[in-house]
Amino acid sequence: MAQYELLLPKMGESVAEATIIKWAKQPGDMIELDDTILEIATDKVDSEVPSPIAGKLIKQLFKEDEVVQVGAVIAIIETDANAAAAPAETAAAQPEAETVTEEIPGTEQLPSNDAAAQPVKQSNSDRFYSPLVKNIAAQENIEQSELDGITGTGAEGRLTKDDLLNYIQQKTGGAAPKAAVAAQTAVPVVNNQPAPSKPVQPVVSVNGGDEIIEMDRMRKLIADHMVMSKHNSPHVTSFVEADVTNMVMWREKVKRNFEKRENEKITFTPIFIEAVTKAIKDFPMINVSVNGTQIIKKRDINIGMAAALPSGNLIVPVIKNADQLNLVGLTKSVNDLAIRARNSKLKPDETQGGTFTLTNVGSFGNVMGTPIINQPQVAILAVGAIKKKPAVLETEYGDVIAIRHMMFLSLSYDHRVVDGALGGSFVRRVADYLESWDINREI
C-alpha cells in the first residue's frame, strides 16, 4: 500500500487560498476516481474538489471552516502502489511550486515584514504547519524545535494560529505577540498608496427583542470590498434617460422564434452588453484600471454582470472578450453564467478578470441606481426598469406626445481618471446605441 497526498488545487489566477466548507468523505471511506472529497469556497465561488485517484481516505489535515493555501496538503489517501505511481511521477516532474500571493482586487499586498520572510528552520518532525503559523513563528523568532513542543488543538493535534498566539502571550507574560500587533497596526496599501484609515465603528445598542444575525462568509467579503472601493475611488454618477421603444418591440417580435430555434430565452441583458462593448470601443479610456499614478489600459473587453443569489448575496460572473461575441453568443453566455451562478456551479476563473461591470437594478423594479465600482475597474453601469411614459417626439409635422418605452442608465465612475466629459459621453453613447436599435434586425 502507498499513501497519496491530496493537494488543494490551483483554482485560477489571483486565487491563493480557499475555505473548507464541508468534507464529503470521512476517514475510512473508500473513494473512487473523480469522487467529490470536499467542498471549498474562494472569495467568489464555491466548488468541489474531486479525487484524482481511487483509494481510502485515511486522514483529513484541515477542519471545516479553516482557510487553506493553494498547494497545501489537505488529505492523505491510501492506495495501492501501482495506482500511486502515476501521480507521484507527475508530481516529481513538476518544478517546485512558487509561493503564491493573493491579489485582492483593487489593492496591493500589505507591507512585508522582514522577519516574516525568514523561513522557520526545518527539523525532522513530520508535523504539519500552515503557512500562517510558520509566518507568525518566524516573526516571533521561534525555533522549529520549540514549535514542535507546543500542544496543538487542531485536527490530529495540528498547531493552530490561536494555539501559537496563546503560547506566545503566556511566554511573554501577557504581552501581545508582535505578529498580532502588526496585524492590527499595519497600514493597508491601495494601488501603491496608503489607504485611508478605517472609520470608527458606531456604537449599536441592542434591545431585548432584536435579532442578531452573523454575516456569512460571502457577505463579509462583499462588505469589505464595497468599503474598500469607496475609500479608494472618488465616485461620481451620471444619468441618461433613453427611449428604447424599438429595442423592446424588436425583442417582443423575435423572442418566440429565437427560443424555438436556439432553445434559449433572449433577455435584455445581452442587448445591453452589446451596446456597452460598442461604446467601450468608442471610449477605450473607460476600460482601464489604476495602479498608483499609472493608468493601465485594458486590451480585452471583459464584461462582468452582477447577479443576485438566492441567499441575497451578490456575485459577478464575467463574459470574457464580450466584444467578439454576436448577440446569439452573448445570450448563451449570459444565460449559462446566470444559471450556474444561482446553482453555485461557477468556476473561480469565471469571476475573475472583468474590466467593466453591468448591473440591472431594473430587475427589482428600480428606475435607477448609484452602483459602487467593482475594483479594480473604474466604472459600472446600472440599467433601470423599462417603463411606458408619455414623451415628446419631434416629427416633420411638429412635436407630438406619444407613449414610449423609457429607461434610465446610470454610470458610476472613478473621478481620479474618468472626468465628467468622458463618463457623461460614454453613458450617452450607450443610450444612443439602444435608441437606434434596428427594429428589422435579423438574428
Image: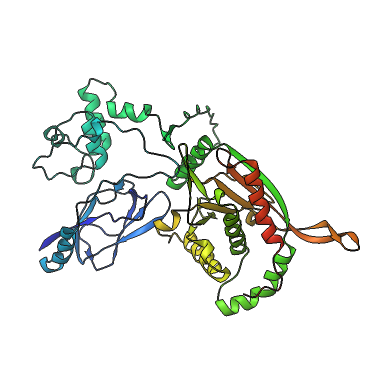
Q: Residue furthest right?
A: 397
Give the percent coordinates (x, y) of residue 33: 25, 68
Task: Name the foreground residue: 361 vs 193.
Answer: 193
Is residue 424 depicted above or below 109 in this figure? below
Q: Quadrant of the N terminus?
A: bottom left
Give the percent coordinates (x, y) of residue 79: 15, 64
**In the shown orientation, is residue 329 left or right of residue 152?**
right
Q: How is the image coloured?
A: rainbow
Give the percent coordinates (x, y) of residue 403: 82, 61
Which quadrant of the view contains residue 258? Answer: bottom right
Task: Name the foreground residue: 20 vs 432.
Answer: 432
Q: Quadrant of the C terminus?
A: bottom right
Identify the residue at image location x=29%, y=29%: 179
Is residue 175 depicted above or below 93 in this figure? above
Give the percent coordinates (x, y) of residue 225: 48, 42
All told, the count of numbered labels is 0
**In the shown orientation, is residue 406 left or right of residue 167?**
right
Q: Is residue 375 at least partly visible in the picture? A: no
Is residue 271 depicted above or below 365 in this figure? below
Identify the residue at image location x=40%, y=59%: 347
Q: Residue furthest left?
A: 124
Identify the residue at image location x=64%, y=41%: 420
Is residue 225 depicted above or below 355 in this figure? above
Q: Is residue 257 at least partly visible in the picture? A: yes
Task: Name the foreground residue: 286 vs 220.
Answer: 286
Which quadrant of the view contains residue 147? Answer: top left
Which quadrant of the view contains residue 161? Answer: top left
